[in-house]
Image: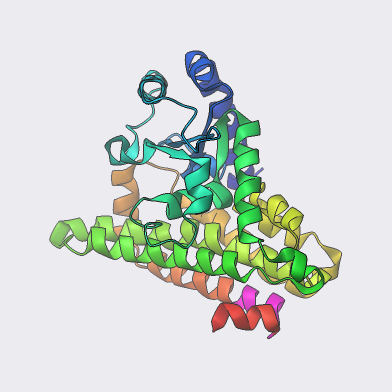
Amino acid sequence: MGAIDDRKIYSLERIQELNKLLVRAQEISAGKACVFASGSFGRLEASAHSDLDPCIVSLCDRGKRSKLSLLSEIALKAEIISAVKEFRLPEIDGDGKYLGQFTSYRLVKEIGSPVDDSDNTFSTRLLMLLEGRPILNSKIFYDVMKSIIEAYWVDFDRYQKNFIPAYFTNDILRLWRTFCINYEARTRKLVGDLRIKKKVKNYKLKHSRILTCYSAIIYLLAVYKLNGTVTPSDAFSMCSMTPIERLESVKNNGDLQKSHYIISKLIDMYEKFLDTTNQDGPLLEKQIQDNEGYMREDYRFGQEMFNAIGTIGDGGKFHRLIVV
């Protein structure tokens, strides 16, 4: 087995072990909310050096109010933080800022709204769909996922035979650009000896985040190429996969043989990335600092992703929509 399989097994085992520490959290959230992880645990590629990126999404009552009360939310967060500490994981990123509760109503209602970015519903929604992994209450997680997909596919009934998920695809592209903008904002002041931290962040951005976004686009392009349409069921299948599983699905499809070589190449390149990053931060920084070739690797990964999109899209209507 390679790094991809090893990381997947490790991630699933760790999530299962973590669940044993969240018995009280399960009691608090039962029937009211789910907790999911994004990041490396969500993609099932966590290592011993990974942190947990948890997020709470609650259901709403008929008055569109969260079923999870404020006190219950505080108690649930406390249980998650306590479990992370007991599990000896790194502290939750952003001092817990992104752990905050989102409601299923807001995740759907704020699609395309002026407050979608400022309320963090945009990034939460897309991460939930593209790399989310339920930790608590998976049924709620997948029910919310379906409701979000239905909102993106609102016009499907009118164009069932040739539906292109333009709305959803535009938001995926927007997420990638948001990642890039956030990277620049957070690293522009890193100068001198701190520049190596910027290089490491860039190296990770141009592998894991590209994969999260563009594996989804490649999968949707492939479905459209084969069927001439993309159904809500297709989207749900895609969102239920990890980014690597999406590429493997395309690679294993006998009707997409023209793309097999380049998809296999992307998977191999990503496996090398996982091998490289399987070490403590200071060691990784030194390794990348001593070898400028890593920066060329992230460029090549992006180039191969571009080539894969071109091969599968083949200049068709959906492909053109992605470019212009």
Q: Residue at x 28, y 65 (%)?
A: 184
Q: Residue 310: x and y, percent?
A: 64, 80
- For this orientation, the residue located farthest to the right is 254
Between residues 54 and 116, which one lies in front from this camera angle? 116
Q: In percent of the image, x 39 and y 63: which residue is there?
A: 178
Front residue of 287/209: it is 209
Q: Residue furthest front?
A: 63
Q: Main secondary structure of the magenta part?
A: helix
Image coordinates for residue 247, horizontal then vertical, percent: 67, 59
Is residue 12 shown left or right of residue 155? left
Residue depicted at x 85% and y 69%: 255
Q: Which residue is at the front of the view, 157 or 54?
A: 157
Q: Can residue 260 be spotted in the picture?
A: no
Instruction: Provide residue 300's location: percent of width, then percent of height.
Output: 50, 72
In the picture provided, is 249 more to the left or to the right than 77?
A: right
Give whichever of 44, 323 is nearer the camera: 323
Identify whether 213 is placed above or below 77: below
Q: Residue at x 79, y 68 (%)?
A: 160
Quadrant into which the C terminus falls = bottom right
Q: Is residue 52 magenta?
A: no
Which residue is situated farthest in the left direction here?
A: 192
User: On the image, which quarter does residue 61 sit in?
Assistant: top right
* Number of numbered markers: 0
Q: Which residues are magenta?
A: 307-315
Q: Position of residue 269 (x, y in %)?
A: 56, 61
Does the rendering let one see residue 73? yes
Quarter holding residue 200:
bottom left
- In the rendered view, tell whether residue 76 sits above or below residue 312: above
